[in-house]
Amino acid sequence: MVTTISKSINTLVADIGDVLREDYIHSHGSIDSLGYRINETLRKRLAEEKEEGSGLRMSNFGSKCDRKLWYTVNRPEEKEPLLPHTRLKFLYGDVLEEVILTLAQEAGHRVEGEQDTLTLEGVVGHRDAVIDGVLIDVKSANSRQFTRYKQPVSDLKDDIWFSTYIDQLQLYLEASKDDPLVEVKDTAGFLVVDKELGHVTLKLIPRDKSNWKERIARKREMLARSEPPERAFKDEKDGESGNRKLKTYCSYCQFKKICWPGLRTFVSSSGPKHLTVVKREPSLMEVD
């Protein structure tokens, strides 16, 4: 997907907004190609558990929980399958991201290098695109998450959710240092769309000059051990019942049952509650 009109990444968000105005004259080439890319996205998402593999990848490198990563690499058969509604949520996000890239092209920006395979010290990843010479990762987010992308980079680096995305982006940038498509070598960015309200923002992230070779080696050494690391997060009190439950981050983990043997799950009005210790039996329906 390439256009020849020269524009700056600094006007990308405003230009996407212009494309969505009723009086904008659209070209047909980029819109026609969107259908093919959505088809490929659907195929990939429906087959991802067969294709994704279980090794160390740029997408999981930055996990705040090394124990989860150890299980991903060494015990993939223990991974809980994603629920249908979760897979649909991810699919919807992927389709929306393809739409945003199409709108960027329609706005006259150079969109290149989509889904190119990148490798750094044997760790593989697939970048979303390079827009106007800047490496870009496209994200869809709910309104609450969307506001987080407007916070300082230092705050995002300390966030257990966003730090994974930032390390992934930094690995893409490091692996692209000799790529002529990536003209800007010291900055990459997140192009983020609010999937509830339709807002779009661009968050530029300066290059992290870490010794990535050393960091990858340390991560591989951890993964080669015969036993998983200690848990990265503790459980927490569930009110005054004496029971204890998983924190939010752990509740989404697909390895929570092997990580916390004896874990019991109950359905409450606010969603599943995963209890690690039960002192008082809840008056809730228990599920497997």
Image: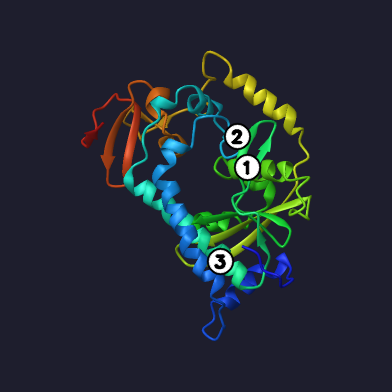
As drawn, 191 above or below 266: below
As drawn, 215 above or below 140: above
Left or right: 132 in relation to 233: right
The residue shown at (71%, 73%) is: 5
Dot label at residue 275 = none
Quadrant that contains the N terminus: bottom right
Q: CA distance from mark 3 to mark 2?
A: 29 Å
Is disc 3 in contact with disc 2, using a CB cutoff of under 8 Å? Answer: no
In percent of width and height, residue 56 lies at 58, 30
Dot label at residue 102 = 3
What SS does tag 2 mark?
A: loop
* Mark 2: amino acid: Phe
Left or right: 25 in relation to 262: right
Is disc 1 in contact with disc 3, using a CB cutoff of under 8 Å? Answer: no
What SS does tag 1 mark?
A: helix
Q: Earlier in the sequence, mark 3 or mark 2?
A: 2
* Mark 1: amino acid: Gln
In percent of width and height, residue 146 lies at 54, 58
**Mark 1 or mark 3: which is in front?**
3
Farthest residue in the top direction? 226
Q: Quadrant of residue 256?
A: top left
The residue shown at (57%, 15%) is: 225
The residue shown at (20%, 35%) is: 283
**Mark 3 or mark 2: which is in front?**
3
Front residue of this view, candidates 57 and 257: 57
Q: How is the image coloured?
A: rainbow
* Mark 3: amino acid: Thr
Instruction: Check disc 1 and report the residue beneath it.
Output: 168
Instruction: Check disc 2 and report the residue beneath it.
Output: 61
As drawn, 136 above or below 102: above
